[in-house]
Amino acid sequence: MPDARPASLTLAALDALPDDHDFGGWGLPLVMSLSVTHGLESTATGKWVYAVLQEPPGT
């Protein structure tokens, strides 16, 4: 099961330079930052990762 990194997201932290091989793993922090709720469940065949997003007001 994945572990989320601390969600201290900045443009510098997300900058993936060609010689920098540690630029992955931001999926869960992004989901955590943008969702109302989220979760992760282990199944016999893998895992389910889900997020509930809120519709912006006035849409």
Image: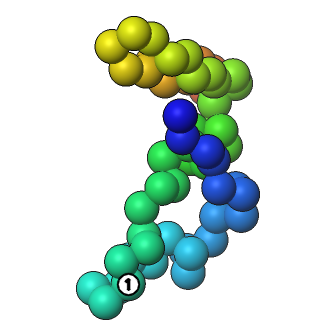
Q: Residue at x 43, y 73 (%)?
A: 22
Which class describes the residues within 10 Å of circle 1: few (<14), some (14-19), or many (20+)? few
Task: Kindly state the secondary structure of the residue where label 1 is placed.
Answer: loop
In this orientation, which residue lies closer to the viewer: 48 or 54? 48
Farthest residue to the front: give it. 44
In this orientation, which residue lies closer to the viewer: 52 or 45? 45
Q: Is residue 48 left or right of residue 37?
A: left
| Residue 50: image location, x then y, percent | 51, 20
Residue 50 appearing in the image? no
From what the image shows, is residue 7 above or below residue 34?
Answer: below
Quarter assignment of residue 47: top left
The residue beneath circle 1 is: 20
For badge 1, the amino acid type reads: Asp
| Residue 34: image location, x then y, percent | 62, 38
Q: Residue at x 54, y 40 (%)?
A: 2
| Residue 7: image location, x then y, percent | 70, 56
| Residue 37: image location, x then y, percent | 69, 22
From what the image shows, is residue 4 above or below residue 48?
Answer: below
Q: Residue at x 63, y 47 (%)?
A: 4
